[in-house]
Every structure is written in C-alpha cells, then in structure tokens.
C-alpha cells in the first residue's frame, strides 16, 4: 500500500511538474536561473555539454563568503531546515545555496546522508519562490501572493522530474568537496564489513572456521569438530589483508566526525548572527530538533514498515526463519525505540530485552541524533566566549576518552565488539564512549571557521583582502608533508595494527593494549581525518582532493543515508533464502560485497526519489508556508 501510494504521488507530481514547465507563468519563457539556482550545475551540463568539463577542477580556490545580506537576501544562515520547495520561504545560507543546522549540517552538501553521517539536508534545487501564476495566486487560490496553490505545491514535492534534477545538481563551490568522497567510501566500507557480519547467522561451522582466528573451536565437542575442517593457520581474520574487515568499524567513526564537522560548521554562523542582532538563538532550538527528527524519520518509518509487514513474505526455505530476530523484535514493540532514537540507551538499561534489537544497525542514528541535540552546547560558547567553548570541548573529549578507558579496564574487555556482546552494549553503541569523533569534528570546524576569519566582524570577513588571503594560503612544505605522513601513519596503524588482536582466541593482547586501543583509536582516527581535510580544504593535497571530490561521488553521496538504511534488508533477504548454510570463501566475499553494494545503491536511488527527497521537499514547503525562515 505504501509503495503504491508513493508511486501514485510520484506520477501525479511529475505530471503536474511537466505541465507547469510547458505552461510557464504568463505564457512567456520559463524563468532563467537566479539566486540559489544559479549556484548549481545540472548533471547533464557536466557530462554532456561539449564545452563543459567532465568534472569540477581538482583544486578550486577558497571562496570568500558573499555579502552579509546573503546571496538570495536571506541574511545569513538559517536556524531551520531548508530545502528547495518552490513556494517556500528563502532559507539560504550566506556561505552556500541553502542552509540549516537541522537539515543541512553544513554550509555545503557534504556529509550518511542524514548525518553528516550521515548529512540529511537538501542540497539541490532552487529555494527561491517562483513567479506568481496568472489567475492562480493570491486570495483566489487560497494562497499568499507569489505562491503556488497548496495542492499543486504538495504534488510537486513528489515530482520525479524535479527530484531527479535535484539528484544531479552539483555545487559550484568545491572547497569541502573531499567530504563527499569520505562519505561514499565509508558507506562502501560499512557494507564491506556487514557482508560478513550479517552472513554469520546463515553460515555453518565451516563459515566460522574459514573466518575466525585459531582457538575459537577449542571448546567444541569432538563430534562437532569432526563435522568440518579447521584451517591449520586459522581463519582469514588472522591475516593482514583481512584486518580491513574489523577496521570497517572506523567507517562509523568517519560518519560521526563528518556529523560533528558539518553540524558545527552550520551552527557557528547561525549563533554568530543571532548574537550580533541580539536575538536569543535558543528560541529556535525546538525547530532545530524537530526539523532533524522530521528529516530522519520518514526513511526509518519506511524501513520499519518493510521489516514488520513485507520482509516475512519476501523469502522462504530452511534458513529463512533464522533471520527473523530483528523483525520479531520490531513486531513485539521495539519500533518505538528507533523512532525516538533511544535504542542505544534502552540496550544499556535492558540488555536482556529483545526490543532494542529491532533494526540493530540504527544504533548509529540514535547516537547521531543525541550528538546533534547536544551540538549547540558547544557551538554557543565557541561564539560568545571562545576560551570557554574550547575548554568545554577539551573537557568533553577528555571525559569521553577516560570513559572508554575506565569501562574497558573495569570489565576486562578485548578491543573488539566481535568478541563480547556486553562490550557492544556497554561501549560500542553508547554516546559517552562514541563521542570522540564527533567532538574532534566539531573542534576542526571551529578551527577552520576561525582560520577563515569567522570570529572577525562581518565586513572584514567578507572583504576582498580576506578572500585573497584564504585563496592563496600555502603552509611550509614540512608542515604539509608532516600532516600527510602523520595522518597516513596513524590511520594505517589503527587499521592494520590489530593483527595481534585477531591472531588467536582468546586474544593475546594484554589488558594495557586493549584499554589503550579502546580509549585512543577512536581519537586518533578523526584526528587523521582532520589533517586530511585541512590539506584538501586549503588546496594543498591536489591528488587526494581530486579523487575525493570527483563529481560522481557528490551525486552518490546523496544516496548514502538511504543505502545505510536499506542494505541490511538486502543482506537478510539474500543470506537467509539459501537452502544450505553459507560456506565462506574469498570468491563468495567478493561477489556478495559487490552485489550488496549494487543492490543497496539501486534501492537507495528509489527510496531517495520516492520518499527521502519528497519528505525533504514537504518539510521545506511547510516551513515556508508557516513563515519560518530563521
């Protein structure tokens, strides 16, 4: 029913949109792009036009922000979610086409969609209102002057033409373009790791033997050991190359870092504008939080409905019933934990309950929402009292690091959630132990903001001299190479340095090694990311920046939130439809990963066009009609 309704709305919206384009207001030519629309390039313009480059240049100069009035007269960063719903209020940011901490989490479209994650804002089409239609606006149509009739505006939110054009639009300013690549590669890394994790329940003992380190089968009875063969040197996790599988945990830390960076990057100018005008920024906090919830929840709702009502009918066979634990937890009432984004906290309070296992991978969104709600506590003092803001950030980061160390030492945890379920519930999914990357991202955003003159008066920040100084920035060679080498060394050591940890079960690592890795690894990783981002933002790493800023990654980056939401459904459907337990091999791993990545991307495209983007359009339309423009 839901799928049919979405398809019907998409068809109706597309028909209305096409009709509107064929009959422009007043019978003249369609209006030319202006304002926010002029700052994007349609995808076909980048890939089809003979005179256009196939991609943005690898390194673009840093651009000075536009005048204080904003590019579209918006007057600075909005405190509310923005989108491109025509007929809505102009919610544009002074440093980008559209802005809002609640929806965008950044001044440019970076960031699992949905968070800086996953970054969940709209980024695509014009935010300016269309010209009034002759005979359709004003009181006669029940709308305000210059607005479309409400029914037409609602249907156009679902237009496939409009949403497809939005998907293909590209940013003109590529300063932060490298974050698109980080987001896309991290999403692929998540699917890479989950390819194994989500197959273990459908795999037999031979699957475990080919994967797990030596010693895992020591406690099995002899009759069971006789039913499969053990590799003499242990499973793949005991090899160097397969350290990339458990290292996929760092992909989640990358999303948390992106979320902290982009949320703070958007909040700082919003708070600064409010402070300069004497307005109370906190009065916008309810809409800040509500807008975020409304941007995340539509896809979460679609996933819950699919799991509860549709997934049981999608497969059968002798293995099918083994994969129904998450669906059973959702049907038992666990769905509300996901919609309130408290799944991780409930798991700590009631670890023996099955309810928190409903859509287990959404623990990430619970943490991200909690970080998002707390972000203004750091952004506000960073603007009003910078020394106090930096001290608060440092204190929170120290406290999170200490919490990891103390909890790990007291409970004697090994440095992997693969070894201990209580480590997963007590450390891996809790906000006080996962906050390090978010806080480092927030600190880097504040550093970059200050480097660009964010604390200076508006007139000085937007002066030509300031713009030139940023565009021509060049650090000493020793600093550039030192940052690059340091970031590479730290991130490679964290990824492959776990070879000893996975060389045997139980792990041969000492308590000091386990505690140190648990407490410091999620601190070192975002510090390395910050070094890479600094070099890319400032144009001092052209090769890396060119790869990460490649324009197809900007397009695919818009689908990463939906891909994160849907990929476990694909994995369950495939893995548990088999007629025999899965047997692990390198070929199976390669085929499964590429297949899951392709199917998750395809389904994410459909979800983005039919659900995620229309929901963003509806939210922006509602805010515009209510006159909420920051």
Image: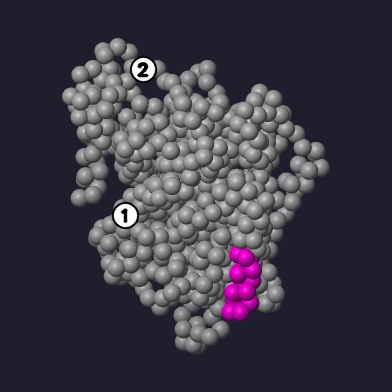
- Which residue appears at 33% of the width and 23% of the height? 130
Residue 602 percent across, percent down from the top left = 38, 45
- Which residue appears at 59% of the width and 67% of the height? 237
- Which residue appears at 29% of the width and 37% of the height? 158
Q: Is residue 109 visible?
A: no
Please give left or right for residue 62 compared with residue 299 in the image: right
Q: Is residue 414 magenta?
A: yes
Q: Is residue 439 magenta?
A: no
Residue 18 percent across, percent down from the top left = 27, 25
Q: Is residue 347 above or below residue 489?
A: below
For label 2, the residue is 31
In the image, the segment drawn in magenta is 399-415
Q: How many labels does the image show?
A: 2
Residue 567 percent across, percent down from the top left = 41, 54
Please give left or right for residue 92 compared with residue 333 in the image: right
* Inter-mark Cα distance, 1 to 2: 37 Å
Which of marks 2 and 1 precedes in the sequence? 2
């Amino acid at each position: 029913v839901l799928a049919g309704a979405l398809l019907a709305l998409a068809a109706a919206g597309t028909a209305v949109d096409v009709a509107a384009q064929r009959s422009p207001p007043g019978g003249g030519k369609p209006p030319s792009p202006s304002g926010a629309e002029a700052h994007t390039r349609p995808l076909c313009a980048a890939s089809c036009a003979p005179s256009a480059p196939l991609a943005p240049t690898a390194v673009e100069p840093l651009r000075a922000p536009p005048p204080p009035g904003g590019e579209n007269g918006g007057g600075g960063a909005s405190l509310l979610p923005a989108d491109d719903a025509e007929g809505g209020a102009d919610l544009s940011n002074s440093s980008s086409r559209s802005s809002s901490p609640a929806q965008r989490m950044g001044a440019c479209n970076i960031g699992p969609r949905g968070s800086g994650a996953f970054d969940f804002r709209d980024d695509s089409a014009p935010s300016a209102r269309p010209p009034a239609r002759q005979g359709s606006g004003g009181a006669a149509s029940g709308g305000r002057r210059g607005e479309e009739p409400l029914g037409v505006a609602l249907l156009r939110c679902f237009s496939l033409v409009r949403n497809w054009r939005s998907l293909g639009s590209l940013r003109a300013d590529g300063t932060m373009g490298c974050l698109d690549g980080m987001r896309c590669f991290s999403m692929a890394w998540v699917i890479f790791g989950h390819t194994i994790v989500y197959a273990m329940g459908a795999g037999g003992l031979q699957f475990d033997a080919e994967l797990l380190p030596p010693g895992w089968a020591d406690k099995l009875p002899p009759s069971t050991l006789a039913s499969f063969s053990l590799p003499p040197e242990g499973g793949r996790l005991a090899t160097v190359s397969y350290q990339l599988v458990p290292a996929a945990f760092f992909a989640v830390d990358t999303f948390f870092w992106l979320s902290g960076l982009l949320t703070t990057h958007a909040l700082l100018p919003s708070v600064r504008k409010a402070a300069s005008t004497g307005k109370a920024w906190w009065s916008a906090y309810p809409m800040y939080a509500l807008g975020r919830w409304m941007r995340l929840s539509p896809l979460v709702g679609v996933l819950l409905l699919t799991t509860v009502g549709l997934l049981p009918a999608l497969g059968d066979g002798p293995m099918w019933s083994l994969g129904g634990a998450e669906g059973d937890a959702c049907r038992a009432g666990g769905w509300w934990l996901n919609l309130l984004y408290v799944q991780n906290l409930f798991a700590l309070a009631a670890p023996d309950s099955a309810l928190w296992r409903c859509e287990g991978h959404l623990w990430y969104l619970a943490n991200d929402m909690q970080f998002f709600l707390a972000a203004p506590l750091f952004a506000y003092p960073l603007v009003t009292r910078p020394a106090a803001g930096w001290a608060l950030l440092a204190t929170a980061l120290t406290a999170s690091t200490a919490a990891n160390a103390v909890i790990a030492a007291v409970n004697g945890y090994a440095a992997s959630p693969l070894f201990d379920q209580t480590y997963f519930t007590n450390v891996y999914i809790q906000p006080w132990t996962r906050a390090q990357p978010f806080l480092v991202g927030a600190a880097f955003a504040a550093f970059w903001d200050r480097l660009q003159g964010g604390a200076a008066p508006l007139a000085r920040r937007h002066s030509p001299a300031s713009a030139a100084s940023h565009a021509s920035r060049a650090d000493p060679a020793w600093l550039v190479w030192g940052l690059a080498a340091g970031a590479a060394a730290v991130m490679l050591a964290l990824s492959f340095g776990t070879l000893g940890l996975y060389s045997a079960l139980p792990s041969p690592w000492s308590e000091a090694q386990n505690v140190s890795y648990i407490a410091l690894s999620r601190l070192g990783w975002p510090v390395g990311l910050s070094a890479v981002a600094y070099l890319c933002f400032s144009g001092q790493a052209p090769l890396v920046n060119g790869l990460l800023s490649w324009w197809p990654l900007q397009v695919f980056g818009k689908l990463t939130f939906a891909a994160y939401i849907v990929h476990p459904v694909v994995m369950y459907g495939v893995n548990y439809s088999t007629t025999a337990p899965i047997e692990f091999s390198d070929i199976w791993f390669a085929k499964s990963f590429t297949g899951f990545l392709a199917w998750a991307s395809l389904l994410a495209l459909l979800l983005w066009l039919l659900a995620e983007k229309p929901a963003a359009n509806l939210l922006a339309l509602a805010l515009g009609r209510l006159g909420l423009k920051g």
